[in-house]
Image (spheres, helix red, strand yellow):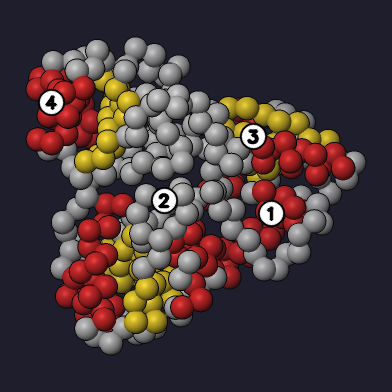
Amino acid sequence: MVSSSSSPSQPPPAVFADVGPDLIAAVRRAAPKRIVLQVPAGLVRDAHELAARLRAEVGSPVDVAARPCFGACDLPSRDEAPRADLAVVLGHAPIPNALPERTTFFVEMRSPVGDAASLADTVRAGAVPRRLGLVASVQHLDLVGPLAEALRSRGYEVRIGQGDRRLAYAAQALGCNYTGAEATRNEVDAFLFLGSGRFHPIGLALAVDRPVWSIDPFRGVLEDPIDRGAVVRRRLLAVAACHGARRWGVLVSTFVGQQRMPTALALQERARGRGLDAEILLADRIDPRDLEGRSFDAYVSTACPRIAIDDGPNYPKPVLTPPEFLMAIGELPLEPYRFDTFH
């Protein structure tokens, strides 16, 4: 469950494809007293230029949020930007069931890059299975339809799934939620991720238990499928390392899009029911440096599941997801592996 401190009267966030006249006009109409600008790591270099543009064209002061931004789940809090009454967030789509605390404009940075026909030829040359599900990062969602048609014209059966209430669009991927793909899992033999990097393909492979290829629209390169077995084995080794753990730290993020206190309380009760110690630890951003020197044997994170999966080796003690924790205490079998889908 995702809780939100938003007022029921808070309007839904506005969405823009890119940094253009529509965004500037909307910010002017909002007449904010102060703006907080948040950008992901890949856009940090351009953040201050955009802040200067907003100041010049809108006339409102602009603060740039310096904290690393991982998604629409960790927007600037009231404490981080107490004077701002408008947030402009680049590179992410809104999460429908996690309303922001303040008026927020999401700029999804949709990219027109990528020739559907050429990409489809590359997929065909790569011997990708013909029954195929499509998934994309928000920047490349506009290419999903054209690529699906190009693939179908080459003999592919293509499926595009609609996810749950956490996903704004069909085919969309979030690092914590691949329910759009899960909706089509039984109709396909493989998935194709449209985007760059291995972050989403790894999460997708864990969630759907199907081969996952990825293709980068910018480079036109088809990547080899994710070795899901190797990723699962690493996670099961982390689970095995926790079998003798008696003292557990239950990590809870206070970010509006990551807070799962009901889940944390339920896990704490499960642990105590088995005679284990379990203490809830609160933080906004979960940081390994904040866990150093503590007397816990292991941790279970109810925040973003990718903390455990991708960043686990950076922590002083093993960090599990909630399903992995239940495996470690004997309440779930090791097979099949269960991805911690954030609903």
Which residue sits furthest bottom? 155
Between the C-alphas of marks 2 and 4, the distance is: 31 Å
Tell me residue 189's x, y (percent).
46, 80
Name the quadrant containing residue 85.
Answer: top left
Amino acid type assigned to the residue bearing label 4 in the image: Arg
Q: Nearer the viewer, residue 210 or 152?
A: 152
Callout 2 touching callout 1 (CB < 8 Å): no
Please tell me which of labels 4 and 3 falls first in the chain. 4
Which residue appears at 33% of the width and 44% of the height? Answer: 93
> Residue under circle 4?
53
Q: Is residue 214 left or right of residue 248?
A: left
Front label number (1 vs 3): 3
Which residue sits furthest front? 9
Please tell me which of labels 2 and 3 falls first in the chain. 2
Marking on residue 324: 1
Q: Secondary structure at mark 1?
A: helix
Which residue sits furthest right? 275
In the rendered view, would you say 225 is above or below 291?
below
Q: Secondary structure at mark 4?
A: helix
Amino acid type assigned to the residue bearing label 3 in the image: Met
Between the C-alphas of marks 4 and 3, the distance is: 40 Å
In the rendered view, would you say 36 is above or below 205?
above
Instruction: Give the class, few, some or many, for how many residues have Cα within 10 Å of label 4's Cα (few <14, many ≥20).
Output: some
Name the quadrant containing residue 130.
Answer: bottom left
Q: Is residue 78 left or right of residue 281?
A: left
Between the C-alphas of marks 1 and 4, the distance is: 46 Å
Amino acid type assigned to the residue bearing label 1 in the image: Glu
Which residue appears at 22% of the width and 50% of the height? Answer: 110
Can you see residue 313? no
> Residue under circle 3?
261
Between the C-alphas of marks 2 and 1, the distance is: 24 Å
Task: Specify the quadrant that holds the N terminus.
Answer: top right
